[in-house]
Image (cartoon, rainbow, N blue to C red):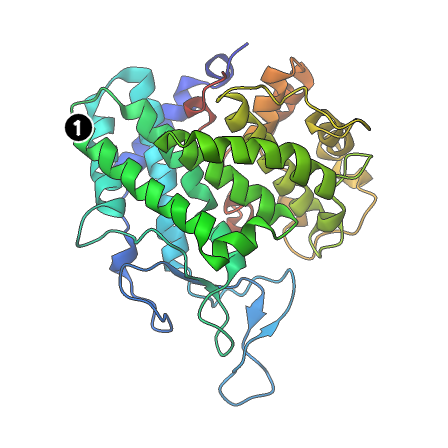
């Protein structure tokens, strides 16, 4: 069984049609008034921070963990995710049909978002998840670019199209190479890498994807070693849970999110050399153990023995791509059936922003 055998073409083409009809969104379209950066610098506000009720101007913001502030500046996040989603849908449709209409639209979007002098995003997240009245950006904001991990796979699917000439591909590789260097060398990137929970997993998902795209074998080897010696030992309990996620105010959603990205990381690294799908620590901790822990609660959420999430509990679970990858690689049809039974296009914005992958068809199986 392969990913392409599981995913129906009708859904891919439907989403690609919507992507064709949508307008391009770029970082420079909307300048954030509180940003310390310029018009090409990504800016966002930390999700769980709200105006201070005890001060006349609401400053400094105060934390309400797990409660997303709908008044935060989110345009750049939305533009970034829209770029990822549209590029993924268009590239998947091009892979299926060879129709240059999809490739033309995807190429224009990617060039505008990453390379055009007028509309490009600068390759850093220095001002991500800023807290008004407290700071201009935070290390944990690096997770805002997690969705970009799918873009290199979209570019790969578009190779061969006359609308994706070598010069455009090289330009995109240069952009992602510069961003990867920032992730590896800036204090924000280094702190995110060492955060110790889902943020660490997501840093490695980004680094592995960008390294694969740019041919950075050293970073791929670094991520593979971290998967074995840092992430699994420090984040997964012997029973397969993620204790640091269970302590959060959204333990169910965060557990799904952490496992999905661990599976995605395993998938990327396994496609670049040594397979990690069957790797486990001496006590059995590995992706199988993580799936075994969470699977019963994905089938029956009412059996979840921990606290309910303070938000969006009813919107979970959804069709996270990691379940599909695991089912295929581990030859466990129950995980494929789980993915098929869940909604691939949830409408809850909190759930949507926690979906790293929108088009599993783009991600090679080997």
Q: Is residue 128 visible?
A: yes
Of residues 27 and 37, the one nearer the viewer is: 37
Residue at the farthest top position: 1
Q: Secondary structure at mark 1?
A: loop
Q: Residue lying farthest bottom?
A: 56
Indicate whether 259 appears above or below 124: above
Q: Is residue 118 above or below residue 335?
A: below
Residue shown at 35% from the left, 32% from the top:
214
Q: Residue at x 44, y 29 (%)?
A: 217
* Residue that mark 1 sits on: 163
Q: Depth check: 56 or 238 in front?
A: 238
Left or right of 42, for residue 297: right
Left or right side of 323 for 123: left
Examine the image and state in which quarter residue 290 appears: top right
Picture quadrant where residue 162 is located: top left
Q: Is residue 320 visible?
A: no
> Which quadrant would the N terminus be assigned to in this image?
top right
Q: Residue at x 71, y 43 (%)?
A: 235
Residue 56, relative to residue 8: is it above or below? below
Q: Callout 1: 10 Å neighbours few (<14), some, many (20+)?
A: some
Residue 187 horizontal/vertical position (percent):
49, 59
Q: Quadrant of residue 13?
A: top left
Residue 266: x %, y % from top left: 58, 28
In percent of width and height, residue 163 lies at 17, 28
Going 53% across and 27% down the picture, which residue do you hit? 269
Residue 291: give x, y in percent of width and height: 71, 29
């Amino acid at each position: 069984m392969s990913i392409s055998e599981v995913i129906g073409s009708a859904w891919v083409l439907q989403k690609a049609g919507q992507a064709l009809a949508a307008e391009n969104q770029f970082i420079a379209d909307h300048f954030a008034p509180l940003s310390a950066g310029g018009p090409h610098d990504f800016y966002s506000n930390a999700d769980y921070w709200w105006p201070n009720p005890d001060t006349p101007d609401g400053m400094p913001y105060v934390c309400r963990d797990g409660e997303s502030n709908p008044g935060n500046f989110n345009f750049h996040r939305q533009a970034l995710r829209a770029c990822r989603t549209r590029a993924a849908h268009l590239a998947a449709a091009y892979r299926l049909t060879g129709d240059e209409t999809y490739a033309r639209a995807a190429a224009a979007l990617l060039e505008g978002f990453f390379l055009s002098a007028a509309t490009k995003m600068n390759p850093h997240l220095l001002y991500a998840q800023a807290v008004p009245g407290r700071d201009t950006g935070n290390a944990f904001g690096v997770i805002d670019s997690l969705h970009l991990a799918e873009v290199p796979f979209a570019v790969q699917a578009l190779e061969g199209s006359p609308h994706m000439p070598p010069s455009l591909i090289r330009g995109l590789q240069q952009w992602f190479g510069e961003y990867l260097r920032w992730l590896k060398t800036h204090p924000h990137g280094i702190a995110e890498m060492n955060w110790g929970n889902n943020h660490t997993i997501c840093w490695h998902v980004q680094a592995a994807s960008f390294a694969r795209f740019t041919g950075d074998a050293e970073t791929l080897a670094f991520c593979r070693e971290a998967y074995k010696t840092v992430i699994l030992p420090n984040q997964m309990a012997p029973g397969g849970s993620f204790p640091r996620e269970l302590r959060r105010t959204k333990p169910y959603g965060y557990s799904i999110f952490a496992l999905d990205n661990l599976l995605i990381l395993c998938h990327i690294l396994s496609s670049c050399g040594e397979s990690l799908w069957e790797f486990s620590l001496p006590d059995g901790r590995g992706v199988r153990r993580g799936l075994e822990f969470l699977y019963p609660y994905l089938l029956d959420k009412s059996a979840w023995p921990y606290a309910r999430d303070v938000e969006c509990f009813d919107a979970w679970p959804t069709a996270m791509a990691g379940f599909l990858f695991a089912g295929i690689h581990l030859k466990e049809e129950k995980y494929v059936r789980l993915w098929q039974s869940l909604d691939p296009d949830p409408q809850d914005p909190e759930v949507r922003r926690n979906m790293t992958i929108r088009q599993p068809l783009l991600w090679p199986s080997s």
